[in-house]
Image (cartoon, rainbow, N blue to C red):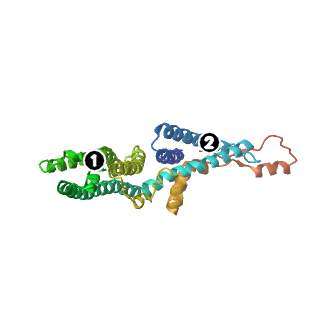
């Protein structure tokens, strides 16, 4: 009796271990799939796990009292429902395994690439700004000197046009340097105004994304990665607009190499295809076996055919139901 109880305990523990493993994978898989939405992840995990647990225990009870005709139609129908539920459950669990075991490092690498893209855009913006300002300042100095010397209509037209927009009549030899300094300071402020707001937002997103990706914060990594991903596109558009407004030129930023690889955190099927390998299947099968172990180990009833045969031999007809022997866990 002691060994029987010990065996039952081991089997029950294996089932609960399987359920805990399944619920953990379900919760993680749902969290990754739904961008960290706990309102969806928690109830889906609890409901699916509860339904599977109830079905398995029902199958165990049915196996104990199975008749010669086999399982009832309702039991067979419920078994197909169990199989149907096992497919999405396995996909979601497998998604958690794929992310944790195979894809995490790649997602962190993609995040670093997005951050590098933001840094690259800022460097290009500042380099192009410095280059243009050097050219414009040299042109401004030359045209002011030409205008003061010759009163050239061409120099006057250049000074009055964009980007200088200077009051030519007010320019003289004594205020030439002041005019150039004032214009330079004003243009630098314009460049900075277009850049600073983008830079500040980028710095905030980079800081939060770095923390979430480096520490692998499972409840925020999706959200922070999506913010980083979206900000790269937004920052490029805003930087292009700011640069064009000031310079009337395109920055010609090429960010394609930085954004060509996409994260598969919210795409379980695509991630499944990418990391199709035996390890994942072994893990899912092991969980299913642990959950189903009590069912497999529960003995079916044994009908005493020999006893019935003897009764027939002596001309005795037994109209009662078949005699059942055997025990169940």
Judging depth in this view, the residue of 20 and 140 nearest the camera is 140
Judging depth in this view, the residue of 122 and 326 nearest the camera is 122
Residue 277, image x and y in percent?
51, 63
Query: According to the image, label 2 marks what residue?
Result: 55
In the visual, does 305 lie left or right of 57? Answer: right
Q: Residue at x 49, y 38 (%)?
A: 42
Element assignment for label 2: helix
**Quadrant (top left, top right, bottom left, bottom right) of the N terminus:** top right
Query: According to the image, label 1 marks what residue?
Result: 165
Relative to 260, does residue 188 appear above or below in the rendering? above
Circle 2: is it few (<14), some (14-19), or many (20+) Cα within 10 Å? some
Judging depth in this view, the residue of 43 and 226 nearest the camera is 226
| Res 171 seen here | yes
In the visual, does 233 lie left or right of 199? Answer: right
Residue 69, image x and y in percent?
77, 47
In the visual, does 249 lie left or right of 164? Answer: right
Residue 315, image x and y in percent?
88, 47
Q: Residue at x 39, y 46 (%)?
A: 224
Mark 2 vs mark 1, CA separation in Å: 80 Å
| Res 275 seen here | no
Circle 1: is it few (<14), some (14-19), or many (20+) Cα within 10 Å? few
Identify the mark nearer the N-term, 2 or 1: 2
Element assignment for label 1: loop
- Give the number of the mark in front: 2 or 1: 1
Kindly check if marks 2 and 1 are in contact, taking CB atoms under 8 A apart as contact: no
**Quadrant (top left, top right, bottom left, bottom right) of the C terminus:** top right
């Amino acid at each position: 009796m002691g060994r029987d109880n010990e065996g039952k305990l081991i089997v029950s523990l294996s089932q609960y271990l399987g359920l805990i493993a399944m619920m953990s994978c379900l919760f993680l898989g749902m969290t990754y799939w739904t961008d960290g939405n706990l309102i969806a992840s928690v109830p889906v995990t609890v409901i699916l796990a509860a339904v599977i647990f109830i079905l398995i225990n029902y199958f165990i009870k049915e196996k104990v009292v199975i008749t010669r005709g086999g399982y009832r139609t309702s039991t067979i129908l419920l078994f197909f429902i169990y199989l149907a539920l096992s497919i999405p459950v396995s996909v979601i669990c497998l998604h958690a395994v794929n992310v944790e075991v195979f894809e995490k490092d790649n997602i962190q690498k993609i995040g670093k690439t997005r951050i590098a893209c933001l840094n690259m855009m800022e460097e290009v913006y500042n380099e192009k700004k410095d280059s243009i300002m050097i050219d414009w300042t040299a042109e401004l100095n030359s045209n002011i000197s030409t205008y003061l010397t010759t009163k050239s209509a061409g120099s006057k037209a250049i000074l009055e046009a964009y980007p200088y927009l200077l009051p030519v009549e007010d320019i003289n030899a004594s205020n030439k340097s002041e005019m150039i300094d004032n214009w330079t300071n004003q243009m630098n402020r314009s460049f900075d105004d277009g850049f600073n707001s983008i830079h500040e937002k980028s710095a905030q997103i980079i800081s939060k994304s770095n923390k979430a990706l480096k520490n692998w914060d499972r409840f925020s990594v999706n959200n922070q990665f999506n913010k980083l991903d979206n900000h790269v596109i937004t920052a490029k558009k805003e930087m292009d607009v700011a640069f064009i407004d000031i310079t009337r030129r395109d920055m010609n930023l090429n960010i394609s190499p930085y954004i060509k690889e996409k994260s598969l955190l919210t795409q379980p099927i695509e991630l499944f295809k990418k990391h199709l390998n035996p390890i994942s299947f072994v893990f899912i099968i092991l969980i299913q076996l642990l959950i189903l172990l009590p069912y497999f180990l529960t003995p079916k009833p044994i009908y005493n055919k020999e006893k019935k045969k003897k009764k027939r031999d002596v001309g005795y007809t037994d109209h009662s139901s078949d005699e059942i022997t055997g025990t169940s866990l």
